Each structure stands twice: as structure tokens, then as C-alpha cells.
Image (tube, helix red, strand yellow):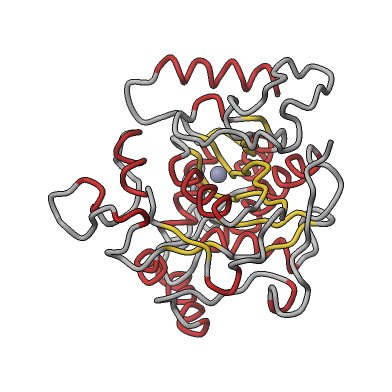
Amino acid sequence: MAHPVRVLPEAGAVPGGGIDCSRGGGVPAAAGRALRGFWALILPTSCVGCGRHDTSLCRPCRRTLRRATVRPFRAEAGAGSLPLRDPDGPGSGTGAPGDDDAGGGFEPLPVVAAGIYRGVVARALLAFKNAGHTDLARPLAAALGGALLAACSDLPAGPCLLVPVPTRGRSLRRRGYDPLGLLLDGLRRRGELPAGSRLARPVGHRHPGVRAGGRPAGIPWFPSARRGGQKGLGRRGRQENVAGSMRVRRRYRGRLEGVQCLVVDDVLTTGATLAEVVRALRAEGAAVAGAVVLAATPPPSGAELAYSEFRRNRRGEG
Ligand SMILES: [Zn+2]
């Protein structure tokens, strides 16, 4: 039995039928463009893959990137903080062939990744996200688009809402652009999103200092009060850093019940960030079927076992 799917009301749900760029503390579009132009002027142009001059990604490295991301794979096995798969969702406990888990609900959320976060994939993503190389958006978007198509082909027919992990206002101000939004918006503009899918931003960050469930925040020595990204944190730290930090934006409240969603992010590490987006969506009754990432990385430390499992999983699927 497919999960009952409801479509977001057309009128005004997602202005322009696509991504809505309004978010607190954002950078005005013109300022973002100016910043991007500034980066393009001052950045030395050398290939992020091999260092060859006069190009951000030379032709051979572009081919390497394409080869490394052309076969999307299931990457949830190495990410210990992912939420559980929706017990009523597609593919769990349905009695479908090869589904031994009749009870469902004890498997992690399925995550489809375009490639492994290493080599030219990691270097291109880092340059794109943190060094202003927005000219890498096209090849990276192609990789993400392939993973989105693969993930959507596993879903029951029907509309699907693509929900990007929200960017922190601070990161947006520092970069002048939203890397994931740039990729997804490019795919949408070129008509390269999977048929039947729509892009929307129903999830945002809570105002700093406000946490769900009355968790203390804003106290410097309290672990969960740490403000900033997930980089450099272990699994536990990542969970604590994001727990309760997101919420469904007001205008989407009461409109997500039964809506089939795929959460989209750039890199999968422990899955703690995805888990927080999924929690916020499920609190509104959304049917989160899975997640899609551009690249998946093994947990940062002490998880050799998880990593080998992750590699086995990839070989098995790929
Ligand atoms: Zn190169």
C-alpha cells in the first residue's frame, strides 16, 4: 500500500512554483551577485582537481568528477545519526519482494548519494562551498540531479516535495550565496528536476536561543548551545548541536500532512542534520520518504567498522 500522498495547495504554496528564497537574515540577491562577481575577479583560476591553470575544473578532472558521481548509491549504512525510515512509508514492511522486515520501522532513512566525499568530488564541493567557486555549480548540479532522479525513481508514483536542508544565516552572509540552493535552483531553471517533484523551503532554523522542548540554549558552556556548523564535531556533538534547532516555517504549517518529501543536502556525515530536518517535517505530518545528498562521507572518527560497512554497502549497490 502506497502512503497516502497529498499535494501542497497550488495557490501561493510555493511562489513561482519553485524555490522560495525568503529566509531570515538572508543576503539580498543583488548583494549576493556582487559578492559572487567579486570572488570570480580575485580568485586564481586553477583546476581544483589537478592545479592546471586557467580553469576551475579541467576537462579530464570534469570527466573524473562525472565518473565518480554517475552511479548513485545508497549511503545510509555509515551514518549513525539518521532517523528511522517512516514505518508507513514506501518500501518498508510492505511485503514487497526482498523486504524481510515485515514490521518495518527499524531501518535507517534511505539516503541516496551521487558519490563518495573524497578526491575531486570533495575538492570541487569544498571549492564551490567555501572558496567562492560558483562556476562549479553546473557539474555539481549534474551530479546532484542524477542522485535526485535515482531517489525519485524508487518512490511510488505521485508528487514529491524536495526539501533542502536550510542554510544558516551566518554562512549565507559569509559566502554571499547558498550553495545547495544554487545547485537546486539551477536544476529547476533548466527543467532538470525529476518529473513530479517540486522544490520548496518549508524548514528553517529557529531563532538562535530558542530550542524545541525547552532545551537550554545560548549558554556558552552548555554543549547544545554551541552555535555554528557541524564541522569538527563527533556523532554525539553533531546530534546535540542541531537537536531542536529547526522548525517548519509558519506559512507551511498545517499544509504538509501526508505530503511526500525528500530531504536534500550536500554532504552526508553522521546524518544528524538530516535527522533534524526530518523531525521538523514529521512533526507537521509530512511523509519523509528519504534523503538525497551530493556526496557521502564516513563518520569523522573512531568508526572504521561503520566505514567498511559503508564501503561494502556501496559495492553491493553500485
Ligand atoms: Zn584538472
For residue 130, above or below residue 85 = below
Looking at the image, residue 139 sits to the left or right of residue 173; the answer is right
Give 314 or 198, whichever is nearer the viewer.
Answer: 198
Give 197 or 188, whichever is nearer the viewer.
Answer: 197
Label total for image: 0
Give 244 or 42, whichever is nearer the viewer.
Answer: 244
Q: Quadrant of the N terminus?
A: top right
Give 271 or 297, whichever is nearer the viewer.
Answer: 271
Report if residue 118 is visible in the image: no
Residue at 82%, 40% (x, y): give it: 2
Residue at 58%, 25% (x, y): give it: 106
In the rendered image, residue 196, in percent from the top left (x then y), is placed at 83, 57
Looking at the image, residue 145 sits to the left or right of residue 21; the answer is right
Residue at 33%, 45% (x, y): give it: 231
Report if residue 313 is visible in the image: yes
In the rendered image, residue 125, in percent from the top left (x then y), is placed at 50, 49
* Quadrant of ligand 1 in image: top right
Residue at 68%, 63% (x, y): give it: 199
Q: Quadrant of residue 300?
A: top left
In the rendered image, residue 130, in percent from the top left (x then y), is placed at 41, 57
For residue 65, above or below residue 105 = below
Extreme residue toward the left, this view: 221
For residue 242, above or below residue 90 = below
For residue 290, above or below residue 256 = above
Extreme residue toward the right, this view: 157
Q: Quadrant of the C terminus?
A: top right
